[in-house]
Amino acid sequence: MKNVKTACLIAALTGLYGCGGGGGGGGSTSMNLEAAQGIWDSSSYSGTDLGASTKAIRSVMLKDGNAWVFLLDNLITNNPTPIGLVKASVAVSGQSFSGTGKRYMLDTHTGSSVEVQGNVPATQQLALKFGAAANPTTLATLTPLNRASTAATITGAWTFSSTTATGVGTTTATVTWNIDGAGTLSGGDTQGCTFQGQVLPRSEPAGVFNVTLTQTCAGTVSQYSGVALQNSASTSITFGLVATDQSTGTVVVANKVTPT
């Protein structure tokens, strides 16, 4: 994605999620994806299957079967920077759910396949582990951060800087996206690119927005879709975006412009 920090990694991700029942019944009761929906933060991550630089994750699990995992370079409490993105599509079967997707790293053009396994051992917990099936790496239990998503909290101007590699170095652009009360996104950057799209609240209480985005740069049109989530103060939005052809993905952290 030109002028938005882009992951050009096209490695396949093979996902396998297992979900243990939160109650009794010996696994006889089928679960549904609502049991796992929400935004979940890891306390830490010390494995290598998500890249050596990944120290924590933020996972967005949606009841429609879409799972988004933001790979972070530090603990949640230490104001981390996203360094990668995983998008997977999952389906429930009995007490487990499984699916496939892709992993996109933001600093490399190469990558590797990764397997994901997990369970919901009790209310307010989601346990995930990453790695080969024979020797998975365990991820710490996660805690959900659920809240309703509303159009009012995202209305306004949002800005971020994006650095793009060129043949002789890098070019940095300032990007501004304006979102109105109807969720319509418009904007541009200092390199002449324009953006149009929508950021709409999802119905479930997960504090997540659906995003569609069209970028036009020097006559080239690129289309993306994904999710967005805000910090608790509603002063920044993290966008996870994947190209329509699934070839590229990116993470953008935009800060709200305060009127002067």
Image: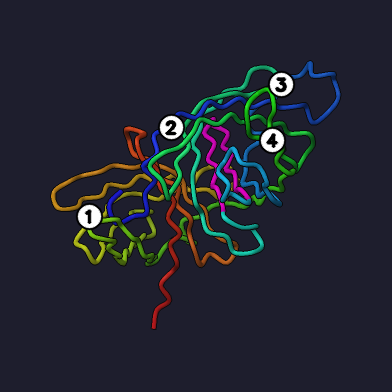
Tell me, yes or no, whether the two marked residues, 2 and 3, touch with CB atoms within 8 Å: no
Q: Quadrant of the C terminus?
A: bottom left
Binning the other alpha carbons within 10 Å of mark 4 as few (below 14), some (14 to 19) or many (20 upward) gives many
Please tell me whether mark 2 sits on a helix, a strand or a loop: loop
Q: Which residue is mark 2?
A: 11
Q: State the CA–CA distance, disc 2 to disc 4.
A: 20 Å
Please name the residue shown 25% across and 50% down the image. Answer: 215
Q: Which mark lies nearer to you, 1 or 4?
A: 1
Q: State the CA–CA distance, disc 1 to disc 3.
A: 51 Å
Q: Where is residue 89 shown, x and y percent of the image?
A: 51, 29
> Does residue 160 appear left or right of residue 16 in this picture?
left
Tell me, yes or no, whether the two marked residues, 1 and 4, touch with CB atoms within 8 Å: no
Q: Magenta segment, which residues?
A: 56-72
Q: Which mark is residue 95?
A: 3
Q: Where is residue 202 shown, x and y percent of the image?
A: 50, 44
**Residue type at tag 4:** Thr
Specify which label sits upstream in the sequence, 3 or 4. 3
Instruction: Give whichever of 17, 94 is nearer the camera.
Output: 17
Specify which label sits upstream in the sequence, 1 or 3. 3
Q: Which residue is mark 4?
A: 137
Specify which label sits upstream in the sequence, 2 or 3. 2
> Does residue 81 appear left or right of residue 162 in this picture?
right
Q: Which mark lies nearer to you, 2 or 3?
A: 2
Specify which label sits upstream in the sequence, 1 or 4. 4
Q: Is residue 124 above or below residue 91?
A: below
Q: Which residue is mark 1?
A: 167
Instruction: Give whichever of 155, 86 is nearer the camera.
Output: 86
